[in-house]
Structure formats: C-alpha cells, structure tokens
C-alpha cells in the first residue's frame, strides 16, 4: 500500500511575514491519518482550525489566503509547496499571527524543517485526485491573455511560461517543465525565491503589503537588473518560483494531483480558479489509491531522504 505521510516529531520556526512584517512563530506537528493539512491560529482568544481546501481560499492578491470566519492565514503557498514536494499528507500548522513567515523567500527552509522533523508513513492509503479529462481557465485576450490547464497524466508534471518584459527576467529561462518522476523537488525547485520590483514597493507598502520584504528574502529588481549581491540561485529562478507557487496553490485542493499542469502567466488567483473549475466537474476527476506501490507513478513511492 502506498501510505499517507506525516512528521515523526514537531519542529518550529520563527520569522516575519512578507506582507505584514510581523514576527511569527510556526510549529509543525504530526497529525493523524486523513486529517489533511490544518492551520491553527493559536494566538486568538479561542484557537481556530482552518483546514486547507480550495473553497477556503478567500484572497489571492500576491499570495494565497485561507479563512474560516474572521480567522485567516496569509501566504501559505511556500509551505504548501514544500508539503507537496515531500509528499506530506497530514500536518497541523500552529501559527501565532496571521501570516506564514517568509523565511528566505523560497520553500527550501520549509523543506529543511520538514525533513529535520522526519517523515513517517501512516497506516492509511494515500489518496490522489486523478484528473480524467482536460480542465482549463483563461482570462484576457491578445497580449493580456493568461491561462492554466490540467490534463490527464499518470504522474505529476508542471509546465510554466512567464512573460514579464523586463530585461533582468528576459535574460533568464522563460519556461520550465518539472516532472516529479524525473526531478528532485528539493534540488530543482524548492530554492527558487519570490521576486519583486522596486517600482512596485512604494505602492505595495502604501497598501500595507510587502512590509517584511527585502533583499534577504526576495529577488529585488530595479528597471534594469537584479539588485541582490549574490545574484540568482538558478539560471531560470523566476519561472521556477512560479512552478514552486503553483505546486503550493494546487496542493490546497487537499490531496496530491495526478495530472499535467500547464500555465502561461498564471498566478494565485488563476490557480485557485482552476481548482474550483476541476471540483465543479465531477466527471473530470476521481479519487484513487495504490494498493501496490509499484503501480503508483514514479516519484511518489519513495520517502524523501532526511537531511
């Protein structure tokens, strides 16, 4: 049986929120089988559980936000991406503020935290959402068009193309394909950082956003070049971060996907629209398990090595 996974023990991190600038402590705890990933706002007078699911997403401006009532958690996509990349099914995420810490701006710190705690199998079958027919969402037209698509595929493959028309971005790779059966998430995707432009910073901060952002947790560009003294971690770090974000956004559906995802200029909003479109078509997917792990797509059966 290909089994569900959780952590062996708890682990903690302290950081600041990218948009709020607030100090935040995060505690990742093991969770029983079939729990899913649940964020807990432990700073509220009565702690509130916010289970991760596509319908819980209430804001997609510059990040993915999930809510239950008035309680919310912002910027969950990098942690969710790490969970998707390592195959973590069940997890409690205790958080004492409303935004997940940005740490270094990528998912690599979350990968380190999860692997340091250790990943263990549970006595329950891992459940996948297998896409059975193409589903697509699209917005705009001409030069403003953007789209995202899911298609049937025995595995998990993501293809993303960007178009920022900025000298520093245009000089790097514009398209990346990552396949879980061939690549290694922690090596190939997880280290790609979020990025932004100095011309947008004043506007964002006037709107109470990007208050915790800086050169230590983002790639920052002026009109011509990257300002970080250490340059890029990958030759195609910009588009790889888009893959990282997409993996996190799509894992908000609550189960790993068996599908081929492709996108052009997509973002958090469109990724969530794609999940909602998929869920609105009961004939477009099915829930599957693998009694024999050898029948599962390559890349899902082996536990990721610990650090």
Image: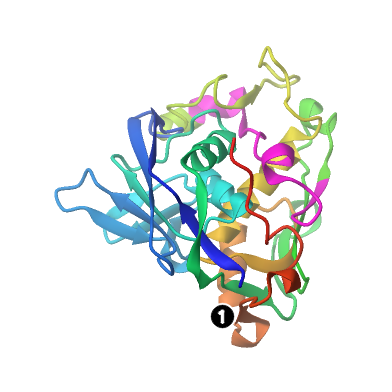
Q: Quadrant of residue 125?
A: bottom right
Q: Residue furthest left?
A: 45
Residue 254, image x and y in percent?
A: 51, 65
10 Å crowding of disc 1: few (<14), some (14-19), many (20+): few
> Residue at left 48%, top 33%?
102
> Residue at left 20%, top 47%?
44
Residue 207, image x and y in percent?
A: 42, 35
Q: Quadrant of residue 231?
A: top right
The span shown in magenta is 176-203
Is 81 within the magenta?
A: no
Direction from residue 94 to residue 241 in the image, left or right: right
Residue 54, image x and y in percent?
A: 49, 66
Is 195 within the magenta?
A: yes
Q: Residue furthest bottom?
A: 283
Residue 58, image x and y in percent?
A: 42, 59
Marks counted in the figure total 1
Q: Which residue is mark 1?
A: 280
SS for callout 1: loop
Residue 151 in view, yes or no? no
């Amino acid at each position: 049986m290909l089994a569900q996974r959780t952590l062996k023990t708890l682990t903690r991190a302290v950081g600041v929120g990218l948009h709020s600038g607030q100090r935040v402590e995060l505690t990742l705890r093991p969770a029983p089988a079939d729990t899913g990933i649940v964020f807990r706002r432990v700073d509220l007078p009565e702690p509130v559980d916010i289970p991760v699911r596509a319908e819980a997403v209430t804001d997609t401006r510059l990040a993915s936000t999930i809510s239950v009532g008035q309680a919310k958690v912002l910027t969950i996509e990098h942690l969710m991406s790490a969970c998707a990349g390592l195959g973590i099914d069940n997890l409690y995420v205790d958080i004492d503020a409303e935004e997940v810490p940005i740490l270094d701006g990528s998912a690599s710190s979350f990968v380190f935290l999860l692997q340091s705690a250790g990943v263990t199998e549970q006595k329950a079958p891992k459940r996948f959402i297998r896409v059975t027919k193409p589903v697509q969402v699209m917005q705009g037209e001409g030069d403003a068009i953007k789209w995202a698509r899911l298609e049937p595929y025995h595995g998990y493959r993501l293809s993303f193309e960007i178009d920022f028309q900025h000298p520093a971005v245009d000089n790097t790779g514009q398209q990346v394909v990552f396949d879980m059966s061939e690549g290694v998430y922690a090596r190939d995707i997880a280290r790609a950082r979020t990025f932004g432009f100095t011309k947008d910073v004043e506007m964002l901060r006037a709107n109470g956003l990007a208050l915790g952002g800086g050169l230590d947790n983002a790639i920052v560009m002026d009109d011509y070049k990257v300002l970080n003294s250490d340059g890029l971690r990958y030759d195609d770090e910009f588009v790889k971060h888009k893959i990282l974000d997409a993996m996190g956004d799509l894992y908000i559906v609550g189960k790993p996907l068996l599908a081929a995802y492709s996108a052009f200029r997509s973002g958090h909003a469109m990724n969530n629209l794609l999940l909602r479109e998929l869920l609105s078509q009961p004939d477009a997917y099915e829930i599957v398990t693998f009694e024999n792990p050898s029948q599962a797509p390559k890349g899902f059966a082996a536990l990721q090595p610990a650090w």
